[in-house]
Image (tube, rainbow, N blue to C red):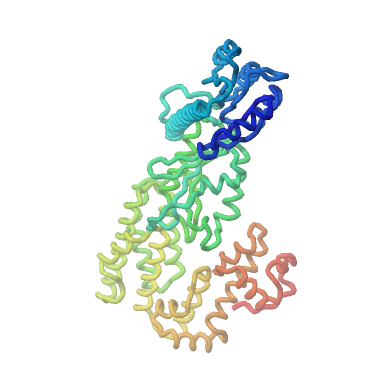
Amino acid sequence: MKLLIADDEIDVREGIRCLLNWSLLGFTICGEGKNGQDTLNQIRRLKPDIVLMDIRMPRLSGLEVVRIAKEEGFAGIFIIISGFSDFTFAQEAMSFGVTSYLTKPIDEEELEKAVLNARALLTEEQKKQERLVQYRNRARESILHDILSNQASYPLPDCHDLQLEASVYQVVLYTSYQQECSQSTWDFAGILRLANHNHNSLDYIRIENHNVILLKGDFALKRFEELADRYINHPQKGSPLDALFLTYGRPVCSIEQIHISYYDAQQLMKRRFFCSFNQHVLCYKDIPHRFQSQETVFNTENTYSQQISNYIQSGNRCMMLEVLDHLRQVFYCSDLEISSIRHYLADIMIQVKSSIFYAYGNRETMFPNNAAIINTIEEKYYLYEILDYFALQFEMCMNAIGSPTRDSILDNILQYIRNNYKENLKLGIIAELFGYNSSYLGKVFTKTTGRSFNAWLDEIRIENSMRLLMDDRYKVYEIAQLVGYGNVDYFHKKFRKYTGISPAEYRRTQTGADIKMSAP
């Protein structure tokens, strides 16, 4: 604690300094007052915890210093030093909250007892204030909980008292991106506070195991939008933001509407099942405007399974993939529970399996057993993973029942690569998918196309990146990811190899007139 010594006699001040071992008692002498005005100035500047002061001083008396300091809100403790003849003044000073007074000459034991009593009073007062702050924070958190969940059945306190004054509000929920991860989530609220320069522009609260952030004001919403656009939508691998998944509701303009934004974010968190690969953010714009009813979806179940069965038997991979994509869109716009979607998809797969078995006989190698199908669907976190699993099974089925001539199979492989160049394609994966030995397929691929598998894949990716570069909505690093390159530097290297210029230079040309590259 800080101690200020005030007396107009330097010998007295020096004597008080040396009378006790102040550091051992837990005090630091922060200054000395030479007269009343000087003492008052130092109280204002240094804000000591205890002022040990003579009652008789020039310019301002000790009594006047006590009165003025208390009127200005000084919360520390005064200990008055007086002579016997100053007792009346000392009594008056005590009416201003002075805890004790000492008579001259100062007794060492009395001084120690006085300052320790003062320290005990200050410590107790600090604890009371801390408890009051805790109670207030708990009360405010409870009110904030009620506002977010629309359960405030009482008149709300003033916005200023709640520190909720703002022209606009938005609610953000966040959790770990790895759904199976049990580790604690990164403190995104802390990251946002830093982005907002620690302004009082957001509140953090936990509701039902959700991390909830309430953004307050245009500045906070703008900073969050910038952070989401720049770092969260395409986070660097291994960065703190790469470990986060978040949703946010629509902006609202009053406290009474905050629960609407919170409800949006809640619903989006439940719709995480519909996220695409490596998607870290869902916003209120991702909520479908209209939902199809459960009856509408279920009535088309046989249609989907029959279509897929027909496309498998005819070897029409493109149409089969279109059906799966249509299924994705239908589910995205449905009001079905996630569990119902899983069951519905399992039924489709089993019906397709039955149809193929009926047409071609019970070939055990074409499909997993029903229990394995159901377990795989239940284990997948996302819809796209289930549909990718379907596509793989259907490809293997088509390969098993199709005509395994070299030309037709290779055409199908090339078409598959054109449709899936964005993915992490490997020759071994493609070979397994189409029932080939990877070494043999590599030789056939090179002999037929005149290029290696990797060279052909790079050309497909670069060709598509050139198309995307004509659209200024995408940044170069975004295009790299969109065409299947996880490393933007590697994308730059490949692009220059095939075009002779960098992606940025190509974009500036606005045409490919100066570039000669044979399309595969």
Image position of 116 with respect to 396: above or below: above
* Quarter holding residue 517: bottom right
Residue closer to the observer: 433 or 174: 174
Q: Say if 464 sits above or below 111 in the image.
A: below
Q: Is residue 132 visible?
A: no
Q: Quadrant of the C terminus?
A: bottom right
The answer to whether any part of residue 333 appears in the image is yes
State left or right for residue 437 relative to residue 456: left
Identify which residue is drawn at 70% across, 24% down. 35
Which residue occupies 55% across, 15% down? 94
Looking at the picture, tell me which residue is in the foreground, 194 or 446: 194
Left or right of residue 401, residue 144 in this image: right
Q: Quadrant of the N terminus?
A: top right
Query: Residue 404: x and y, percent?
Result: 39, 83
In this image, 500 relative to 340: left or right?
right
- The image shows residue 66, relative to residue 397, as above or below, that is above
**Residue at 48 percent of width and 85 percent of height:** 442
Name the foreground residue: 154 vs 496: 154
